[in-house]
């Protein structure tokens, strides 16, 4: 391998990246824009969900229960329907996401010690909002029921004592407030950093489509010199977007960075090496830039969103799906990104994923060099 010829290819590719606005945007700025767009789309906290209440009992206890439901900003009493027909109309029009039906005799059942019935009807067309409504309605109902039991014991002259013999104390490490953004944004950084890898898939496809590959083939440049000369400039350009993405996560989404920034930068370079090796492997088979970019989007975005643990927890995947997911570098880097940013772990705790990225990069780079032929 002649480093002088390799540097010539690198210089040529770097000039193309800096002079071509589309390539420059795709490599350096698009990851940040994708992170901002996707971050707001995935990190919106559900709250203030509109609900309706059909109170058929109209008793002091039913009104106290309604006051309990409105004691937080998770639920908002939007409507008070007066009949089941009106309940159905509200649900059909999407005016409310859930309706609570308090039947006649609610207060009487509670005061006599019998189990009081409540019915909750939710709009299942939006499962996330419906699940949020059910969760908070259940929590408020349990709190109200416990308060009623305590009040009855006090009225009977019996000290309620400790309502639960188990003193359960919860503590969440790394994300004490359990903010969804703290988990989502670091993983999303790993996904958007695959966008520069998509640009690398155009490296050889562009030369073939424009007819400039013939000139490169006629030179004494070797296969490995050409591939490495194409790979390094894209890696360097992609690395420029890493601090921009991290700054967006920390200052734009208020995600605390607990780990070593230099370790994160070094492992990001390793991730770009593995991803771009796959992109160059795609590029040697693509006859046009459109084919190359579509193939890379399918590989990186599909694996990034559905197989990396971003949306679907890795722990609930089947054995075959897990094996397939581990073949993509995005899966490993999402774990690395969350570990360094959220937990502040060191490289030693992540060495298995680091070795995986090295293995993926070396294997695909070797396959690219072996399968690329200096002939038309």
Image: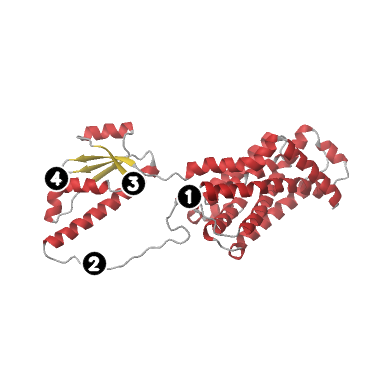
Which element is circle 2 on? Answer: loop
Do the CB atoms of the residues marked 3 and 2 lie less than 8 Å apart? Answer: no
Q: Is residue 200 left or right of residue 215?
A: left
Distance, label 4 to label 3, CA atoms, is 24 Å
Q: Label 4 belongs to which residue? A: 59
- First in residue order: circle 2 vs circle 4: 4
Side of 291 relative to 220 (left or right)? left
Whether residue 64 is visible, yes or no, is yes
| Label whose residue precedes the other's in the sequence (3 or 2) | 3
Instruction: Answer with mark 3 or mark 1, whichever residue precedes in sequence.
Output: 3
User: Looking at the image, which residue is at 31% across and 37% down?
Assistant: 96
Which residue in the protein does label 3 denote? Answer: 74
Proximity of marks 2 and 4: CB atoms separated by less than 8 Å: no
Residue located 73% across and 51% down the image:
365
What residue sits right under mark 1 in the picture? 181
Residue 105, x across and y down, in percent? 13, 46
Q: CA distance from mark 4 to mark 1?
A: 42 Å
2 is higher (above) or lower (below) than 295: below
Disc 3: CA contacts within 10 A as few (<14), some (14-19) or many (>=20): some
- Distance between the alpha carbons at the discs numbered 2 and 4: 29 Å
Q: Which residue is mark 2?
A: 162
Q: Marks 1/2: CA distance?
A: 36 Å
In the rendered image, which quarter contains the C terminus? Answer: top right
- Outermost residue toward the front? 251
Q: Residue at x 60, y 54 (%)?
A: 333
Label 2: how many Cα within 10 Å (few below 14, some 14–19, many 20+): few
Up the image or down, 154 lies above or below 117; here it is below
Q: Secondary structure at mark 1?
A: helix
Label 3 and label 1: CA atoms lie apart by 18 Å
Q: Residue at x 25, y 55 (%)?
A: 143
Mark toward the start of the polypeptide (4 vs 1): 4
């Amino acid at each position: 391998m002649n480093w002088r010829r390799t540097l010539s290819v690198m210089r040529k590719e770097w000039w193309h990246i800096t002079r071509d606005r589309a390539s420059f945007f795709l490599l350096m700025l698009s990851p940040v824009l994708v992170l901002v767009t996707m971050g707001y789309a995935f990190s919106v906290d559900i709250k203030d969900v509109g609900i309706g209440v059909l109170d058929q009992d109209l008793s002091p206890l039913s009104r106290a229960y309604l006051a309990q439901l409105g004691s937080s900003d998770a639920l908002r009493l939007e409507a008070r329907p007066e009949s089941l027909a009106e309940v159905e109309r509200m649900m059909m029009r999407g005016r409310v996401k859930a309706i609570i039906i308090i039947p006649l005799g609610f207060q009487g059942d509670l005061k006599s010690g019998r189990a009081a019935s409540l019915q909750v009807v939710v709009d299942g067309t939006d499962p996330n909002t419906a699940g949020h409504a059910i969760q908070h309605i259940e929590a408020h109902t349990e709190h109200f029921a416990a308060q009623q039991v305590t009040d009855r014991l006090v009225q009977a002259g019996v000290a309620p004592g400790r309502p639960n013999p188990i003193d359960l104390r919860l503590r969440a490490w790394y994300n004490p407030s359990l903010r969804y953004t703290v988990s989502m944004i670091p993983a999303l950084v790993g996904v958007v950093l695959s966008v520069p890898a998509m640009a690398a898939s155009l490296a050889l496809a562009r030369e073939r489509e424009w007819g400039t590959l013939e000139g490169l083939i006629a030179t004494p440049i070797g296969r490995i010199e050409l591939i490495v000369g194409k790979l390094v400039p894209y890696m360097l350009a992609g690395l420029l977007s890493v601090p921009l993405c991290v700054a967006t996560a920390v200052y734009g989404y208020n995600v605390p960075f607990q780990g070593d920034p230099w370790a994160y930068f070094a492992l990001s370079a390793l991730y770009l090496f593995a991803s771009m090796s796959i992109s160059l492997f795609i590029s040697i088979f693509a006859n046009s830039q459109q084919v190359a970019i579509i193939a890379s989007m399918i590989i990186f975005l599909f694996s990034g969103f559905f197989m990396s643990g971003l949306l679907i927890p890795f722990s609930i995947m089947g054995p075959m799906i897990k094996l397939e997911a581990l073949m993509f570098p995005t899966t490993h880097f999402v774990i690395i990104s969350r570990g360094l940013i959220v937990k502040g772990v060191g490289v030693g705790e992540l060495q298995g994923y680091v070795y995986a990225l090295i293995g993926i990069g070396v294997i695909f780079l070797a396959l690219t060099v072996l399968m690329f032929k200096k002939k038309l």
